[in-house]
Amino acid sequence: MSILVVEDNPISSKILDINLQENGYEVVIANDAFEALTILETKKDISLIITDIMMPKMDGLQFILKIKQDQRFKKLPFIIASAMSNKKIVKKAIEMGCKHFIVKPVQSTQLIKLVKEILPNQRLILRDKHQTAAEMGLNIASYQKIANMFAQYLSKEIETLETELNEGKFKNLSIDLNQLRESATTLKTERLLDVLERVRKHLGNEDGRQLWNADKDYKVLLDEMKLLRKVLQLSLSDS
């Protein structure tokens, strides 16, 4: 599941992107409301929208109204992130069904707390490194070394899996799923573990339909591994 950030200011957009990714959330960025509407049509796993108010072409309130009028998306939760604190705008947003607001410049602690309240059961790409390090009995420096080892391991497995899938090889792949699962469990990479469980269910099944599903699952696995590597690298660069 992904969080859609609708923000025309590149700095504000980047701040939201980094804060969310560092806390294990997948993020999709739209530079304006029209781009956001296009993304909603093509990407079906958006679970939350964070939007600015003052934007060109279509402002945040117009965007929210358009979403709320669409039966497919009307139940999507919103967070309004804006430098504006005008009471009339806040009242209008509440009338549209939006009750979550944060004022720019966005404070990471406030943002993540609010996201967790809205999405309490969201499966994370990577859990908070401080929490995971404490559970492993490691200090942050030691955790970073382990995370770096895992990122390097992922890079090798990504290269191998990508090559074999491009060659049309979907059985007897070289990737070591057991080792990958053990490492993913240690570092609390919840979404990767979910995908690995889906792949496991298809292993050894000779039914053609099941093998076709396994083919799709391996491609999802590759995408999830790439996303996890990106988040790990972002976390490491913040050390």
Image: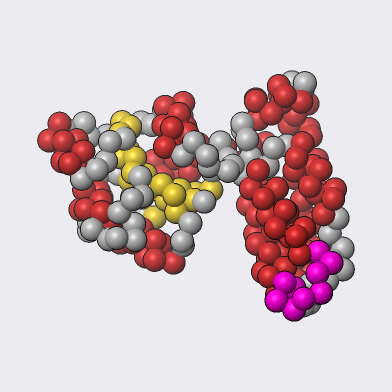
Residue at image location 19% in from the left, 35% down from the top: 90
Q: Is residue 144 above or below residue 203?
A: above
Pick the front one: 215 or 168: 215
Q: Is residue 116 above or below residue 141?
A: below
Tell me where residue 143 sits by quadrant: top right
| Image position, residue 59 (x, y; %) | 22, 51
Q: Say which quadrant the C terminus sits in.
A: top right
| Image position, residue 221 (x, y; %) | 69, 59
Q: Is residue 223 above or below residue 136?
A: below
Q: Which residues are magenta?
A: 203-211
Residue at image location 36% in from the left, 50% down from the top: 76
Q: Is residue 226 visible?
A: no
Specify whether 72 is left or right of 228.
left
Residue at image location 44% in from the left, 66% down from the top: 42
Q: Is residue 42 magenta?
A: no
Pick the front one: 190 or 104: 190
| Image position, residue 77 (x, y; %) | 35, 45
- Residue extending furthest left? 88
| Image position, residue 226 (x, y; %) | 67, 55
Pick the front one: 237 or 51: 51
Q: Is residue 191 visible?
A: yes
